[in-house]
Amino acid sequence: MSRFIIERPLPHGGRLVERVITDKEVAKKMIKGCPSYEIKPTLHYETQVPVRNVYREIMSICYGFFSPVEGSMKQAEVERILKERRLLNEWIFPYPLVFDISKEDYKKLGIGPGDRLVLNLKGKPFAILDIEEVWEIDNHEELAHKTFGTPEDNPEVVKEPFNKKHPGWVIYRSLESIVLAGKYTIINEPKFKPPFDRFWYPPRKAREEFDKRGWRTVINHQTRNVPHVGHEFLMKCAAFTGDVEPCHGILVNAIIGVKRRGDYPDEAIVEGHEAVNLGGYIKPERHLVSMCLWDMRYGNPLESLLHGIIRQNMGCTHHMFGRDHAAVGEYYDKWATQILWTKGIPSFGFPAPPTDVPYGLHIRPQNMREFSYCPTCKEMAYSETCGHKREKLSGSFLRGMVAEGVQPPAIIMRPEVYKVIVKWWKHFGYPFCNEKYVINKEKELEVDLEDL
Amino acid sequence: MAYFMVVLLDDSRMSKIRGTGLEEKIQYMFGGELRCLNVEVSEELKDKILKEFDTARVDSRGAITDVPVAFMRELFNQVAEKKSLGPEVIEGVLAKVDEIKELAAKESEYLPPPEID
């Protein structure tokens, strides 16, 4: 066997966290006599618009996407993350994850450490939280600033102070004050609604699927967008990395969560990527569309760290990163993610890349630039190799075209992908997420629950 | 500076301008895959557009962009109807400014989807 062969990495932390009870009788016994609490969305601290639903974090934790995290974090763990981006067990992790409730609700519940709280979702029992500690967030703004960094503390990559225009900052600023810390366990598996059900590959299932397909090396493509041909070429070409041969598989992992106005609907995103393989532009045998529940924090390098963790847990060997990865606005250097994965960011606790620090990651970064159309080469060309003047593919140009009802040419967007956009446009009456979509999505969520 | 607005042409729109003489004025992007027409806009009409639609802006090429979708759809209708790219096209669009504004106000809630096979 060649010494250059890359093996699938173990989950982050060494083992996959799986905290899902599938036996309903066992679940019923576990919650007998316990107090319950209906999960509430986190509302924007000024506008009261939903900005997060903690159910998505509970799902991603209990199905192992965020391994080795097992629950809502204790105060000491949050403090360590903000200082060094490490959990108390040493493994690297970018963000505080907490179960927060209001002081009023806390008083009403009358619970404390040692108690088991049943968390209801859409009126049905969903999960339990075994409370180990109760602590209070005393300065929300400070928590939000420390979560994302500041130009003073993180001068390598933070360019502007964060503020209420940043959706991730708003999530932390909007948390309720009381944190119930402890492990989550799902006791009633939610059922995904179509089309999400067929894209649900939690880490164990993803690893099994890779085995079934004979994929040893898999490169991940992070997405929150309907794919245009530039994305398709990015996936195809990044996949040439591999080890002694190109990557066997391309995993598209869409982040599904609270939306911003102007985004494409999640339904169109997952089906749009699927259309790429159904249309044969990337063989279905080499391409798998999946998703992870998470309300994007848009933390650029920090978000890329979470993405690396999620995709390593899913069994990927490689992860592609581009410019402005998971970014919004100009808070971070546009290459901050690639800086993290090539040099590290000392002020965030990374004197070396996250793959080169103790208790770090094993997934390999593949830092990419851009693809755009070259009229001389008459093909999509890579910015770092093509020497001609190229025509850029911008998302906003495409969105303008779509909004006008003009079908983009196939060289920019595959007709199969456009059909998916129009399918969901007809369904929602709008091609993008508008206020109605955002509000309804947070009301209806991606799942339904059965009675326990 | 010369100002203009870009009218994108898909197959459906192409069929509506066939034989009008406008085909000779088509410009091509993305290796000929994307067809468009540039409608000329005078200084005076540019100012009117910017005054009527606060999202509108002029980019570095002199192209007027970020107007409501209803504006862009009417722009094509006027091009096809008048078989021209001259100032009368924008004048025709601005003659329907109230109707366009009414549609634009509803655009954040509903946009009619295109009919495709």
Image (cartoon, coloured by chain):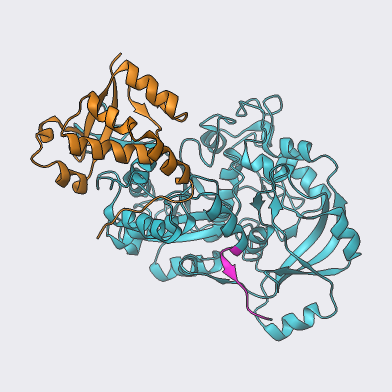
Chain colours: A cyan, B orange
- Looking at the picture, tell me which residue is in the foreground, A205 or A49: A49
Q: Is residue A152 visible?
A: yes
Residue B14: x and y in percent read 17, 43
Quarter of the image holding residue B58? top left
Quarter of the image holding residue A152? top right
Residue A450: in magenta span:
yes
Q: Residue at x 48, y 56 (%)?
A: A266
Q: Residue furthest bottom?
A: A25
Quarter of the image holding residue B63? top left
Q: Residue at x 63, y 26 (%)?
A: A160
**Image quadrant for the C terminus of chain B?**
bottom left
Q: Residue at x 22, y 45 (%)?
A: B10
- Looking at the picture, tell me which residue is in the foreground, B97 or B27: B97
Q: Residue furthest top?
A: B1
**Where A442 sits versus B27, above or below?**
below
- Looking at the picture, tell me which residue is in the foreground, B92 or A255: B92
Residue A56: x and y in percent read 63, 59
Residue A430: x and y in percent read 43, 52
Count the marks: how many? Answer: 0
